[in-house]
Image: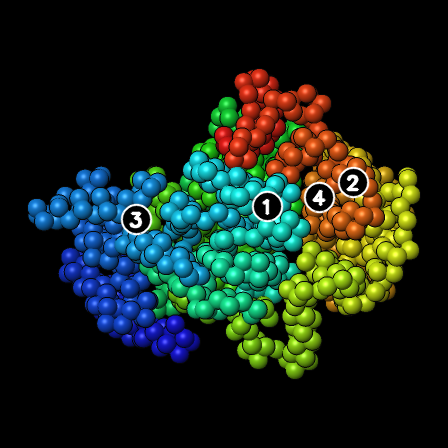
Amino acid sequence: MDKKQSGSEKKQLTSLGNNGEFMTVFAKLVTDNNQISESEQEFILSCAVLFFRHYDLDNRYLSYFKIGYYIVLKYALLFNDYRPLYDISLQIGFYSISDFLLNKKIITPESLDEGMLNRSIKKRYVSAENYVETLEQNSSSVSILENLDKNIAYIAPTSYGKSSIIRDVIQKNNFYRIGIVVPTKSLLIQTYNDIRVLNLDYKLILHDDMYAQNERFIGILTQERATRLIVKHGANFDVLFIDEAHSLLERDSRSFILSRLIQLNEKRNPQQRVVYLSPLIDEPDNIKLIQTTEANIYKRKIKHDFKVADVYLFEDDNSFIYDKFTGNIYNLDRPLQFFSYIVSNSRTKNFVYHNRPKKIEELSIGLANHLPDINLTEELRRMIKTLRDEVHTSFYLVSLLEKGIVYLHGKIPNVVKEYLEYKFKTITPLNYIVANNVILEGINLPIDCLFITSSYGLGGKELTNLIGRVNRLNYVFKHENLELLLSKIHFMNSAEFHGNNDIKNKMRLLRDHSFEDEIKNPLLVKYDVDKLGLSPEMKDKRILENTKIVAATNTILAEIGEDPRLYLKKYLVENSIDDFYKDIDLAVDAIYERLSNYQFAEGQKVVDIVSYIFIISSENNIKDFEIERLKNQKAVNYYNNFLEITQKQSLKEKINHTFNYFKIKAATNDPQLFIGSSYGEEIRYSEQYKHAEYTRPVYVNLSQKDDQKLINLAIVKIKIEEDFVSFKLNKLIIFLFDFELIPEEYYLNYVYGTNDPRLIELIRFGLNVSIVKKLSTDQQRENLGFDQNGNLVCNANFRHYLSTQSELFQFELNKYLGVN
């Protein structure tokens, strides 16, 4: 839908406010006022029918469908009269609802024909997972399977069967080499377990180095690992499934890597098929890439979502409800303070959203002060003991669990984050999860109420995706509660947590049901810098950057012959090392000269070598602040120690080690610690980084923190360092090995903490280094193995051993054994 049509539609709905009779009744419905007479009930249902008819005349006007369905659903829930909802569900293909109403005997068929129709629906529209699909879901699945000679985009709201599409395409086609590309490591194991249970005759690989020239394989990979599989091992994919494909529209390193992956795979396999999966793309042709031959992308889009939302506003210690159809705001006259509002409007499983990790922790602690202690089940007691024993007694979450609160953000170590997600999903008394968009990257969680306390970075699409996490369809029908079809969304206007911006401006974005794609990626065919609304100065800068991005992509795709400098440049771009530098050609010259003069010597430490090759010769050309720190010998020594010792320690050992370091540093005349923008409180100016990007507070003063704050900062610091090593430093160490600057045994010991190929196999599969070290120490490696399809399996001895271990350790192993 274009902006002109969207504006016209919104204007027409706004004009409903001039219809006094309609607005009187509709306002009662919106505000859950059941003082609606029978004649008013008939009137508002007649209006719903008219809205559906208006939509039927021109189905581009989706808001008319949405308001009609909203009226019928609200009416059903308010008056416990489900016949209109049943009738309309049959007519518009919401068969999941009509089937539910019949199964629960809320509705009975009124005729023999109606009964036969329902039996026919039950037979035709039941999925492999044994749930009843909507008409759109079913027709989309059939259509996609009939059109696999094309590239396909399946655009559907969250929880509308995207995983089923992947399964059906794999099972019903004879693709040999399959790639499922997920945006984060957090999604790897979830997707792996979804595929594993299908028992397909494919080798499953989670890491590029698990590939062994397999004829039939399914690679469940991040875009980085999938790229290395092509570049390093010479593989290619017959079909690529691109999860969260809307990321192609963005302008960041990972969107460029994903773009280049698709381009590179087509060069290796011109017959490739790409299936793009996303809830957020408006027009699939907007993600077509330059340097590819793909024609128009075949689109299947689920337009109708049978979940709707009531949208509330908290402001000035009062509560309101927002009518997103007409734009009216109604005062509910329920005065409450911030946390009291959250508590009084909570449901069973509540998601409190904030974008910043530090504020997430503050919100959790503030909310806990307004909640009574919950009844601690045996499972919760065990969970609290686990966090005390294996993380730390001073970890904020230890006491928060006693209030039914869990918090998540990207600065929590992965094993703890995933453990907390799993426990929130499975333990009923855990009522609150306070988190940022990291929640979108993990397992699907049961959430029936959302409180948005910060709207920073949330545009219309992001809000839609966030709200889509509330009341996922499997959760609605599992709990057999149609009230969950009506999500409760609360926008919280609070200066303390939201800042000075007016959150109502973001709330009003929900009036639009469709959002135009903003094309920021210069590797896309329809990218147009003139449409981005940039200032002349910024536009010129952007054009220059675009030239470099496109040129770097051309380097990857070009045949380079024997030129060693071109080979070096190509390697740097393929592995995104070019992102660390302002000018890639200057970096190539400096690194090439260092390579020519370098000679490995026994006793050298790896980060010293990294600093010599990549940093010292290029200080003024480095734009990555974290990488630039490696010019300092203190930082070099720190990361040498991290690789040699810290990464092999258990989580609790790491925390205690880091805490002790903090205590020592806090007592020095230089107590400032780099912590990053998420937790930073102070600015430390650098000659190299005077520009605005690096004048943000990214340091903390350790001398001003008590022991509990230092412990929780230590937990955060560990995750920051693990991410730095995993996503940045390891790239440079792998470079040293690939260019034969360091011996293989030396390389393996630094990257994997061992040179035992059996242990390395487990680490590449996904287990972290400290867990693999413990398995080795406990002599359990021989009790673990891989079956012919690459699945991790174990024997009875290992099962007994695992049952004697700590809960967090069990959780991590069971996750990979397909038990969790």
Name the residue: 26% across, 66% down: 24
Give the foreground label among 4 and 2: 2
- Vertical comparison of 796 with 789: above or below: above
**Image point 62% across, 45% down: which residue?**
208
* Mark found first going from the N terminus, 4 or 2: 4
x and y percent of residue 461 in the render?
Answer: 48, 62
Chain-order first, disc 3 or disc 4: 3
Check whether the beta carbons of the residues at disc 3 and disc 4 lie within 8 A of each other.
no
Residue at disc 4, secondary structure? helix
Residue of label 4 = 722
* Residue under numbered circle 1: 185
Q: Which image quarter: residue 260? A: bottom right
Residue furthest to the left in view is 112
Tell me the number on the disc at residue 133: 3
Q: As rendered, which of 232 and 444 lies closer to the eye?
A: 232
Q: CA distance from mark 4 to mark 2?
A: 22 Å
- Residue 304 position, x and y percent, is 33, 59
Q: CA distance from mark 3 to mark 4?
A: 42 Å
10 Å neighbourhood of mark 4: few (<14), some, or many (≥20)? many
Q: Which residue is mark 2?
A: 744
